Structures are given as structure tokens and as C-alpha cells.
Amino acid sequence: MISILLELLRICWTFRHRKWYRRFPFLPLPPKRYLQWRIETAYGGKGLQNLRWQDIAAYATWHRAMRLNSSPPVVKNDIWD
């Protein structure tokens, strides 16, 4: 759980807005339009109602495996099961 949260922080830092330090709330978050696009392409809508923690955890696990250049682990109860 902690490793997933740390990886999510790394992901936010990677996709942060270029001039995040100039805009309130001064957090290194991805641009809002990018997040809307990602949710729309993944779930077919702009709302967060279909977003599941398992999907976020699976993405963070995959991202960590790709970053470390290793094979991604098998995730139980994934969307492909």
C-alpha cells in the first residue's frame, strides 16, 4: 500500500504542470485537461464515477515495474480477470 502511494506521488511529479509553482494551490499536480482526457479515454466519460481504486493501484504497480525495467507482477482482481 505504501509503495503504491509513493509511486502515485512519483507519477504526479512526472506529469506535473510545467509552471506549477506559479499557480494556486502551488502543488505539483498534472494539468486538469490532461487528467480529464485520461479519464475519458479510459472510462468513456468525463466523470469519476467509474474510477476504481484497483485500476489506480494496477497502473501504479505497472508504472513502477516499467520504471524499474522489470516484468510487471500479476495483479489479482485486475480488469482482465
Image (tube, grey):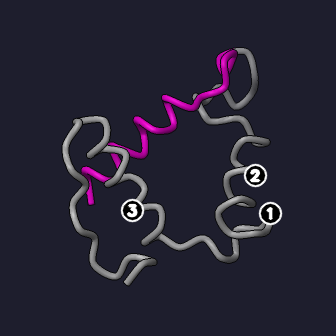
The three-letter amino acid code for the residue at tag 3 is: Ala
Q: Is residue 24 left or right of residue 77?
A: right
The residue pinned by badge 1 equals 46
Between 80 and 26, which is closer to the camera in this rendering? 80
**Viewport quadrant of the C terminus:** bottom left
Q: CA distance from mark 3 to mark 2?
A: 19 Å
Mark 3 vs 2: CB contact within 8 A? no
Q: Position of residue 43 (x, y in %)?
A: 68, 69
Q: Where residue 1 appears, x then y in whole percent? A: 27, 60
Magenta-highlighted residues: 1-21
Q: Are marks 1 and 2 in contact (CB under 8 Å)?
A: yes
Magenta includes 19?
Answer: yes
In the rendering, at what x and y percent does residue 23 appear? 75, 22
Rendered position, 55 above or below 59: below
Quick one: label 3, few (<14), some, or many (20+) residues within 10 Å?
some
The CA span between labels 1 and 3 is 20 Å
The secondary element bearing badge 2 is classed as helix
* Residue displayed at 64% across by 36% down: 30
Task: Judge by depth and name the residue closer to the eye, 20 or 42.
Answer: 42
For image coordinates 49% across by 29% down, the residue present is 14
**For mark 3, what is the residue?**
57
Picture quadrant where residue 72 is located:
bottom left
**Main secondary structure type of the part rendered in magenta:** helix
Question: Which sits earlier in the primary sequence, circle 1 or circle 2?
Answer: 2
Query: Whole-percent x and y of residue 63?
Result: 37, 45
Q: Which mark is residue 36?
A: 2
5 is within the stretch colored magenta: yes
Would residue 39 be found to the left or right of residue 65 on screen? right
